[in-house]
Image (cartoon, grey):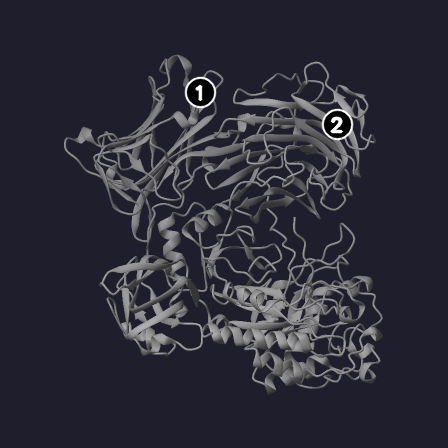
Amino acid sequence: MRRALGPRPVRQRRPVRLLTAAMLACGLLTSATWHASASATGGTTDLLHAAFGGSFSSGNTYTAATGETMDGVLVRRTGGEQTDPADGIRLHGGQEGLTFTPSTPISGGTVQQPFVMEAAFTPAATQGSLATVFALGGNLFARYNGSSLQYGFSANSNGTWSDATKSVPAPTAGTQHVLSIAYEPTAGGATMHAFLDGAQLPDAISTSGPAGWNDTSGTQAGFGNDVHPSALSRGLTGSLRQVRLATFTSPFVPADLALQTVRSSAKRLGVDFEGAVSTDGTYHPAEGETADDGLTVTGGRITTPGTLRLAAAPRSATGISWDTAPLGTDPLGSGVLAESVVAPELLQPGTPVMNVLGLASLTARDQHTVRLSAGADHWDVKLPAAQSRSGVRYQHLALAVEPDTDGLALTLVTGDHTVSGPFHAAASAAPAAVTPRIDWLTGAQGTVYGVAVTAFSGLAPADVRVLGSLPCLATKVAPAQQISIMPGECLTSLVAKASAVRPDGRQISWQELQQTAFLHFGVNTFTGAEWGTGQENPDVFQPSKLDTDQWARTLRDAGFKLAILTVKHHDGFVLYPSRYTTHDVAGSSWEGGKGDVLGDFATSMRKYGIKVGVYISPADENQYFDGVYANGSAHTPRTIPTLVPGDDRAGRKIPGFTLTADDYGAYMLNQLYEVLTQYGPIDEVWFDGAQGRIPAGKVENYDFPSWYQLIRALAPQAVIAVTGPDVRWVGNESGVARPDEWSVLPTVTTASGSRDYALSYSAQDQGSRSALLAGRDSGASALSWWPAECDVSIHDGWFYHENQQPKSVQQLTDIYYKSVGRNADLLLNIPPDQDGLIAPADVARLTEWRARIDADMPSDLALKARATGDGGNAAAVVDGKAGTDWVAPGPNAGTVQLTLPAATTVDRIALAEDIHFGQQLESAVVEAQGTDGSWSQVATVGAVGYQRIIALDHPVTTGNLRLRILHSRAEVHLDRISLFHATS
């Protein structure tokens, strides 16, 4: 896993509440009762299944006991791993652990095999950094991460790595637990299902390729430690009672696990009729629906996405049917829940609502009553009043059929959560054989909004329904900066909401900056460190020639519009005289203790027309040593500012606040108050998510909501970046945005109150239709306007080091086009040196870089063009004015043509949406007209947003260019088309 210095936020995934607290007694197989077989479940093949009844009789190689399965070689790492009759294998952390190498590889190279990995383990109270329960292939793991248990894998797609991980609270120390994962490769990615002590955990999902295997250890599995060559000291402290590694045949079902009985559910069919029905009745699912060729529709058509209308003559020629092959050879091996969401008027007397496997059926007696039947048994159930969503009335009916001790248990659940049953149908009254089919609404006339089938075990039927967000409606949504979404919400609705998400004024102003600067400056500049200790002598800070005017001139001449100073880095040293710490410039002999870098910085930047931003690290190792940071204090109401003895503000009329915080949160609030009231307008406040290098088990729960509230009150124009609601970290420190960078993406709110990615921050797709669905399924609570900021340093390090040289002009230019040219703002770090100056080599490189960008795009050739097209006001795209737009005629439509006064050579094209109307364009093509009048494609483009700069594969000479929109979420508001030709 990559680790970076400097301001990269340490991503803390939100805690996920466990579904149940039931423990091992529900399903763990102990050494006293377990009897292994070659395959513990019918759908799996065990490669390793050991309860450590054997011994390490051949040095460090394990010899299996009778009944254990070991198709490969199991070895202990150090020899210190000892077998114990009660505990299994005792482990002491560090380099201890077990390595298993299967006889036939299930990983490594290009091998992608579905497998299950399980361990029954007892953790000690204290674990080392990233202590690993089990791992495979070098990049797949389940491990401790502070107070959390983290599981997932690193995916590799054509050389680009991304992480798919989830975290839950770490299990109780000193108690035996069972952890199981099932890795299942999918088309274009992979899914890791996870289970802890009988509870199903959130899936870790990659849409950016499957797990990538390490070249050295790709075929190995580790229990109690990792197998990656750089991670062999991540040993678990505690014991392993039992371990298992097995392959399985997709699709995964919980019965593939052997060490725990899982309360789980698996959706096997789920459609809301956003897809299409072919002439032979086969239903073709839309993106996000779960279906296969086994779903057929007779006598029905989709009138709008989300609505199926059954209407045919004779009445018997309508209905919906699903082949239950995805349920396996024993479709009633667990409970089956069939659902339908229908218009109430469809429930006419005698309408067969559903028939499940020929075992149980539901028939309408009228719009208010249904009859539940199983063989000769039947029960009449009164329905609640129809529900309504956006003016559409509907009934949501779900019938659960579960095997019982002597027959079947039947439960009916309605949309208002009313549960009827369970009703018991005796085996003697049930049909002799199961029909491998589920039917809905045979012969019915009316509207259907969705059908679904779920296999479940150990859960209440009411808790496994999947159609609770239907009907699927693309209703008009009021524009907002953040719009809530529901679990299971259909794609049509998600796209409508994404289309309605808008930036607020401060985000628009920030996006217009495009190019911003970072200045890392502090005690690290003088110690040579990248991350200080918090125990530095402040007197080490001695910039002998500090000239913030030189900083500002350099930045202005290089095109920067805002600069962010590291007012406080993780070491806690503060670049202004603060009332609340002595670890600051006033504690240094520099300038006789009267220096104020922040004051000089703010004055100089404004003098040269540059806006001011501040980086204030939430992590503070100096305050940890002072007993303030991570001291376990209560979060209580605090008075801000908190006046100190001799405070010069005493007796003055100043704004005051009462905000909830712990001791360190109050310290941060007081420093924010100083910065935001003493140094003029601040336009960006930059927080990362680092915790600081403090002892394991110590944690500071940041008071982000209170910090945000204070910033909004004192600096309403400021964006709060990275660990904040306005601007996000792009996910790397290379300064590179995604090729299709969306400003609208699924988000979550963390336990500390900050906004975070719903998908992994490294996922290469954050905002497409696929990403909206993946985010929904990963627990997103909202779609948010959260644009990307790309941070990168001009040097290898973030602070100045004399032996580091600036990046080349070509490197910086490439970064510019992959950030500013991809709907993001560039944040380039230019660290001052020990003199307090931007180094001459950096000044020269910035000058060369600016000249290169100006030469690439010297003047906008489109300003001389005439624009025509469908929609409205095509001329606006070439009038050179912001806020005048060409409006496409509708979604997925629109062509605008530029006619130049003469044949012109073009090698770059820039497009810009008017983001006041959101981000709508999904894909388009640019075409040039040849001398024969024919059109040829010269570029394709995906997401645009504020700006997309497209470098053509080769220069094109033409008198006419046109943009054709292929896909969009709503009508596109295009603010600008610019054409460029580089000068030599």
Q: Secondary structure at mark 2?
A: strand
Mark 2 and mark 1: Cα distance apart in space: 39 Å
Q: How many marks?
A: 2
* Mark 2 residue type: Val
Q: Secondary structure at mark 1?
A: loop
Quarter of the rendering containing residue 910: bottom left
* Mark 1 residue type: Asp
Q: Is residue 646 above or below residue 441?
A: below
Residue under pointer 2: 75
2 vs 1, front mark: 2
Q: Earlier in the sequence, mark 2 or mark 1?
A: 2
Pick whichever, 493 or 797, lies toward us. 797
Pick whichever, 879 or 141, lies toward us. 879
Q: Residue at x 48, y 29 (%)?
A: 250
- Cβ atoms under marks 2 and 1 closer than 8 Å: no
Quarter of the rendering containing residue 869: bottom left
Whether residue 975 is visible here, answered yes or no, is no
Residue 525 picture location, percent across and down: 76, 71
Left or right, 145 with reference to 78: left
Q: Which residue ends up furthest to the left in the rendered image?
A: 313
Residue 481 picture location, percent across and down: 45, 64
Residue 58 picture location, percent across and down: 80, 20
Left or right, 227 with reference to 737: right
Disc assigned to residue 330: 1
Q: Is residue 857 above or below residue 815?
A: below
Disc assigned to residue 59: none
Residue 492 picture location, percent across and down: 35, 50
